[in-house]
Image (spheres, grey):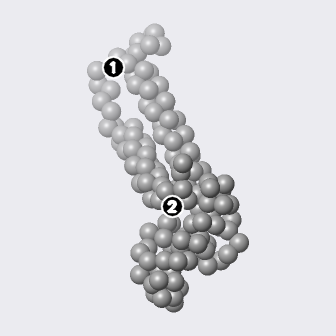
Amino acid sequence: MIHAKEYLQEIKTKREQLERFRDRRAKLHLDVSFGGIDYSADRVQATPQNKLENAMVKLSERMAYLDRKIAELKVDIDDRLNSIESLDNKKYQEVLYKRYAEYKSFEEISVEMVYVYNYTCNLHGEALKELEKHLNFS
């Protein structure tokens, strides 16, 4: 069974995946735009099944795949962030957002929210419990 903490920790992993997919897509786009693919061995043929056409079809399929993965990751990340925002308690929202969207330590959160460290940790625990109830994880 997944818990709220693990659910929110995956935001970072999914953002890293998103950046990798974006980088791969950008590289493919640059390869095509600036001649990164060598077409010198291809000859223009009357048949539609030449190497250039096959390469372009594969490239188009790869770009479409990366676009789908990027869109899926964006939706997933947004869903997780929206789950934080769906909580009624603003303190819960703030501590969870700072921890899982901004990747801040409890010390940093304590300073920013002007709370003592122990209170921040307790608030975080309460916020996770509330989120689990809200998401029906418990």
Quarter in which the C terminus is drawn = bottom right
Q: In terms of depth relative to the viewer, which is nearer, 2 or 63?
A: 2
> Residue tagged by mark 2?
5
Front-lying residue, 63 or 7: 7
Q: Position of residue 72 (x, y in %)?
A: 56, 45
* Residue at the image point whose x is 35% and y is 17% from the top: 43
Near mark 1 (Cα within 10 A), the count class, few <14, some 14-19 or many ≥20, is: few
User: Which quadrant would residue 133 be assigned to in this image?
Assistant: bottom right
Is residue 111 rendered to the left or right of residue 133? left
* Tally of numbered discs: 2
Residue 91 point in image, percent of width and height: 61, 79
Q: Please, what secondary structure does the residue beneath circle 2 have?
A: helix
- Position of 98 relative to 12 (above/below): below
Residue found 47% across the figure and 25% down from its top: 57
User: Label 1 belongs to which residue?
Assistant: 42
* Residue 79, position as x, y percentages in the image: 62, 55
Residue furthest out toward the front: 138
4 horizontally vs 89: left or right = left
Q: In the displayed orientation, state which residue is furthest to the right.
A: 88
